[in-house]
Amino acid sequence: MGARVRRAAVPIAALVVLLAGCSDGVGAAEEAPASASGAPTPLPDLTAAPDAENDASGNPTASPLTEAEKRYIELNGGDGLFEGAVLEQGVEACSRVEFAAQVDQGLLVDDIREGEIAGATGAIPFLCPEYVPQLAEALGGIEDGATETAGLAEGDYAAPAAGLDCEWTLVGSGADEAGDVASGDVAEIELTGDVTTLESSGCVVWLPVSDD
């Protein structure tokens, strides 16, 4: 009985050694460098400063509002409305404007004129001013620059998106009338039969003032 036990112990010991060697080989394979150059793959730098879009705690932060966005929220916000919700409505209106423009520029003008795109009139001058020409065409407005007023409806016009650099001159048969927002003037004008040209800059677009 004793001899048989000793003979069985030899292969068991050998098996233990063999398994240990295999285990070492597997571990070595797992620790092999991942890069083709043989250098260990670098670990991410956990001490790096967070991105500029994150706060000190690493949490995402909202981008600061532009002056045009602030002005849009100021004019279109109301009691109980969050700034983000107001701005989102304007951005959505601009998205619909852009889609209509991609389909057909003429269709966009018609949609604005007929009020098919909710919020477009208020959003375009502030949030997507690249469509100001279509807005002016649809509503009988006047873009910045020198514009002859022949053919335009007489009456009151306002520049809702006028910045502090907005200035204008009404040229006519009588004395010229000038104004600028920086001096405290309100960006509103009256086109009469005596006015032949409107010259403006920094005012974006002049739109007819509704009687409502």
Image (spheres, helix red, strand yellow):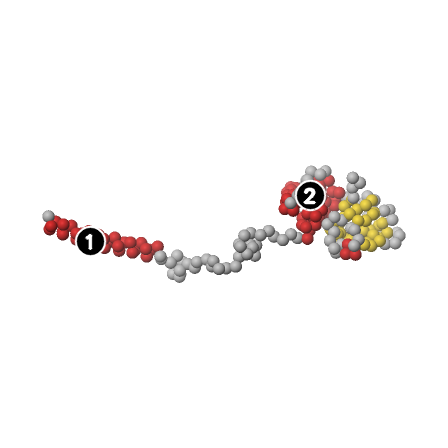
Considering only order in the chain, which callout, 2 or 1, is on the residue closer to the N terminus? 1
Residue 138: % across, % down = 74, 42
Q: Please tell me which residue lies in front, 191 or 108.
A: 191
Residue 69: % across, % down = 67, 50
Vertical position of residue 41 compared to residue 119: above or below = below
Answer whether labels 1 and 2 touch (C-beta < 8 Å).
no
Q: Which residue is mark 2?
A: 79
Residue 145: % across, % down = 77, 53
Callout 2 crowding tier (Cα within 10 Å): few <14, some 14–19, many ≥20: few
Picture quadrant where residue 102 is located: top right
What is the secondary structure assignment of the residue under circle 1?
helix
Q: Amino acid at mark 2?
A: Asp
Q: Is residue 158 left or right of residue 32?
A: right
Q: Residue at x 76, y 49 (%)?
A: 159
**Could you tell me if residue 134 is visible in this image?**
no
Q: Residue at x 38, y 58 (%)?
A: 33
Mark on residue 13? 1
Picture quadrant where residue 77 is located: top right
What is the secondary structure assignment of the residue under circle 2?
loop
Q: Using the numbered discs, state the Cα–Cα distance from disc 1 to disc 2 in whole angstroms.
A: 84 Å
Q: Residue at x 23, y 55 (%)?
A: 17
Q: Amino acid at mark 1?
A: Ala
Q: Is residue 58 left or right of residue 111?
A: left
Q: Nearer the viewer, mark 1 or mark 2?
A: 2
Mark on residue 118? none
Q: Is residue 174 left or right of residue 101?
A: right
**Could you tell me if residue 188 is visible in this image?**
yes
Q: Please tell me which residue lies in front, 55 or 139.
A: 55
Q: Please tell me which residue lies in front, 183 or 145.
A: 183
Q: Residue at x 53, y 57 (%)?
A: 50
Residue 209: % across, % down = 78, 44
